[in-house]
Image: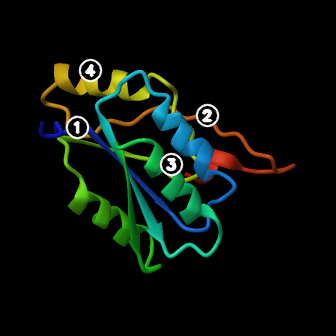
Amino acid sequence: MAKSRPALSVLLPFHNAAFTLDASITSITGQTFFEWELLLIDNASSDTSTAIAIQRAAQDERIRLIKEPNIGITHALNTGLANAQSRYIARMDADDISHPERFAKQVAFLEEHADIGVLGTRTTFNTTLGRSSGMRWF
């Protein structure tokens, strides 16, 4: 039986993200929407983040690891786009945590509003730093 095409491809580039990557992946695998693929794009990590990605990909067939030289996030995202198999694309950073209903709500909205091409979401910024300007930078 052929594997069905996912409705959503999640692009998650990372470089030396061992402290945050597993939690980020867990927030994807915990989604209420199940028709996704997660593309973990490794920009030549030298810490244990590659091992984390390999382990998580072995646990869930929807997760794929793509390795490439460390040439930056822009190239990593383009690599992700070239390997994506779905109609919709979602972005994650290796230190992001997605709300469990994020993809269900985003895909439903896009399905109901064919005239919308790009969809953003509200964020909450949390830090372990004593002092941080957080999302004001963005």
Residue at 53% across, 35% down: 27
Q: In front: mark 3 or mark 4?
A: 3
Residue type, label 2: Thr
Secondary structure type for disc 1? loop
Rounded to the nearest angstrom, the CA distance separating label 4 from label 2 is 22 Å
Residue at 22% across, 34% down: 7
Q: In front: mark 1 or mark 2?
A: 1
* Residue at the disc numbered 4: 108
Q: In this view of the protein, which residue sits in the foreground, 62 or 24?
A: 62
Residue at 49% across, 58% down: 54
Q: Residues within 10 Å of mark 4 (few under 14, many from 20)?
A: few
Q: Is residue 44 above or below residue 13?
A: below
Q: In this view of the protein, which residue sits in the foreground, 90 or 135?
A: 90
The picture places residue 107, in percent across and down from the top left corner, at: 27, 27
Rounded to the nearest angstrom, the CA distance separating label 1 from label 3 is 18 Å
Secondary structure type for disc 3? helix
Residue type, label 1: Pro
